[in-house]
Image (cartoon, grey):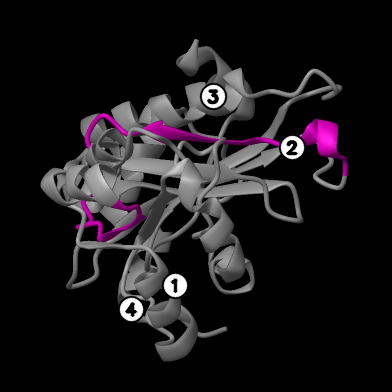
């Protein structure tokens, strides 16, 4: 695969054989983000679990101290007072049967986060095949099925992200923008790593965090020492 000049220049700054301390890796990821736009920085963590087993699932949500740097469009399924509370909290889209019909009939998907009041899940369940594959299906575990929809909207706007294992036992999550700088990115990184460590399943055996890396949208992957990951987060 042929890379552009900026990528090649950035790659020269990174030792691919080295496992970096987390702070050093985040400083490097800021230095290597050279695109004309503000690149998103992502964390990729491979865990020593087997996602095929229900008792080894790792999933949850955490509010990043410095947010994600992205304007989040929130969709809420609610009626009555709960709908009013969601609108007051800043939700861009609020509805019930009308919203379900719009998503099913018109393919409306102009939102980033989906929240539902518990009494709406009978309706929202109809959208499982649409929202599920996009990672937008509300769930109690992620805090997106809740009677306190206003709080959920506020958390989403403040930078709450959901983390979950993929089929290859890796968690992929944004931890901010390159413009945040290493210090703010580290605060977000530490919050996410801490949440992942606390979510360790009782059935997990051996080394929990197998590998860890950070990368900007157009930048180079930078490996973090998995042993130092644990030390820095404790």
Separation (CA) of disc 2 from disc 4: 40 Å
Nearer-the-camera pick, 48 or 57: 57
For residue 166: magenta?
A: no
Q: How crowded is mark 1: few (under 14 residues within 10 Å), some or many (20 or more)?
A: some
Q: Name the residue under label 3.
A: 229
Q: Are marks 4 and 1 in contact (CB under 8 Å)?
A: no
Q: Which of marks 3 and 2 is in front?
A: 2
Q: Position of residue 127 (x, y in %)?
A: 56, 69
Separation (CA) of disc 3 from disc 1: 42 Å
Q: Name the residue under label 4.
A: 5
- Magenta range: 53-79
Q: Mark 2 points at which residue?
A: 57
Q: Position of residue 126 (x, y in %)?
A: 60, 68
Name the residue at 22% across, 35% down.
66
Name the residue at 57% across, 40% down.
18
Separation (CA) of disc 1 from disc 2: 29 Å
Separation (CA) of disc 4 from disc 1: 47 Å
For residue 199, side relative to residue 38 (left or right): right
Disc 3 or 4, which lies upstream in sequence? 4
Q: Name the residue under label 1.
A: 100
Q: Element type at marker 2?
A: loop
Q: Nearer the viewer, mark 2 or mark 4?
A: 2
Whether residue 15 is visible to the viewer of this picture, yes or no, is: no
């Amino acid at each position: 695969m042929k890379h552009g000049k900026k990528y090649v220049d950035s790659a020269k700054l990174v030792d691919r054989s080295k496992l970096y301390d987390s702070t050093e890796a985040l400083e490097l990821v800021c230095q290597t983000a050279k695109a004309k736009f503000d690149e998103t920085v992502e964390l990729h963590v491979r865990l020593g679990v087997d996602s095929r087993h229900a008792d080894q699932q790792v999933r949850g949500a955490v509010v990043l101290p410095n947010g994600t740097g992205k304007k989040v469009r929130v969709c809420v399924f609610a009626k009555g007072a709960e709908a009013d509370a969601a609108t007051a909290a800043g939700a861009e889209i609020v509805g019930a049967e009308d919203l379900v019909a719009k998503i099913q009939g018109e393919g409306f998907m102009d939102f980033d986060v989906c929240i539902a009041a518990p009494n709406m899940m009978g309706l929202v369940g109809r959208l499982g095949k649409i929202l599920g594959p996009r990672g937008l299906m509300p769930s109690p575990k992620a805090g997106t099925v809740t009677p306190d929809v206003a709080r959920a909207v506020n958390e989403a706007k403040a930078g709450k992200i959901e983390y979950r294992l993929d089929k290859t036992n890796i968690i992929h999550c944004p931890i901010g923008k390159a413009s945040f700088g290493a210090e703010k990115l580290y605060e977000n990184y530490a919050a996410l790593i801490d949440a992942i460590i606390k979510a360790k399943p009782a059935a997990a055996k051996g080394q929990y965090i197998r590998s860890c890396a950070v990368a900007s949208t157009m930048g180079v992957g930078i490996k973090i020492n998995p042993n130092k990951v644990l030390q820095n987060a404790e």
